[in-house]
Image (cartoon, rainbow, N blue to C red):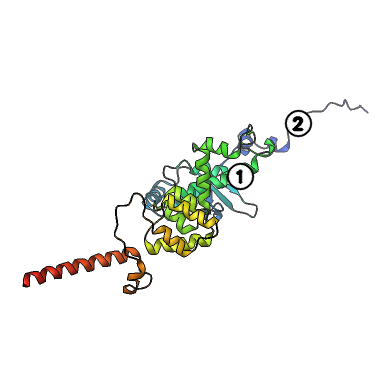
Amino acid sequence: MAKSSGIKLNLPSVDDLFSTQEERDGESRESIQDIPIGEITDFPNHPFKVKMDESMMDMAESVKQYGVLVPALVREKVEGGYEMIAGHRRKMASELAGKKEMPCIIRNVTEDEAVLIMVDSNLQREEILPSEKAFAYKMKLEAMKRQAGRPSKNSATLLQNYEGKTSRQILAEESGESHEQIRKYIRLTELIPPILDMVDNGKVAMRPAVELSYLPKDQQETLYDLMQSEDCTPSHAQAIKLRKFSESGKLGEDVILSILSEEKPNQVEQFKIPKKRIDKYFSPGTSMKQMEDTIVKALELYRKREREKGRER
């Protein structure tokens, strides 16, 4: 009986024998698949708003005619289905266009990697609300901090080597914003939603908004109610004063009203009537603007009657 020569042959596997090189290459590449829209959930706490505006209607019409030209990016969920990473607006447009599926790239990434991709892909947009930047920067910074120090073999991103820089410094370099500006944006996440909406709408400026973010939520709610009833917003100097009174434990409704009633440096000379003197002539909840308009109309009517009396004489 012949002895074995001990030579080991590198024979191809069964899979290699019955698959083409193209198929084997395809397994290692990301592929585009048409995925049922109902199987795709939004990214948790997605900070960018998907608005039902004219731009969205235009996109929906385009999708209806030509389909989604740029595939969305998703990742598989452990419990089944997919999680959207980039493409929330395309998903909404597809739903409006009556599409049941949309083309997607399925990428195997960690939660932190998904956060970084989601934020970076949306920060490229031309118009971004302050609130969107605020929560996006906060999410990205937290993800970067978690990733810092992880062995590079455990992640596909290039954020492991910070070269002695802090996460916020890296974020500042990548975003083109200053370290201080990023800090201010992240402070906005401490505002209650109604005041944050006022920041988005341009009714409250960035600098006073940052100061107001240091007020406890209950004081912010009182402030918001008074801003609505008095039809006014605090200046930067007034916001600083509000914060100081709050930190000293002396910020009550009367103090807030007193500060809001102070004349701002850029205001023209005004004639003021103490609110308590005219409250009895108006229904509860009437704003100062409504009171002012009513008083002006009453004065106009009074002047008209005086002129008519003068003609009769």
Mark 1 or mark 2: which comes first in sequence?
Answer: 2
Q: Secondary structure at mark 2?
A: loop
* Image quadrant where one finds the C terminus: bottom left
Q: Is residue 301 left or right of residue 35?
A: left
Residue 12 % position (x, y): 73, 32
User: Which residue position holds label 1?
Assistant: 143
Instruction: Identify the amino acid type marked 1.
Output: Ala
Q: Secondary structure at mark 1?
A: helix
Q: What residue is rendered at 84% in x and 26% in y?
A: 7
Q: Is residue 17 left or right of residue 276?
A: right
Residue 292, above or below 191: below
Marks 1, 2: nearer the viewer: 1
User: Which residue position holds label 2?
Assistant: 11
Closer-to-camera residue (55/74): 55
Residue 69 % position (x, y): 45, 43
* Image quadrant where one finds the N terminus: top right
Residue 171 % position (x, y): 55, 38
Q: Is residue 60 left or right of residue 300?
A: right
Q: Is residue 29 left or right of residue 123?
A: right
Instruction: Identify the amino acid type marked 2.
Output: Leu
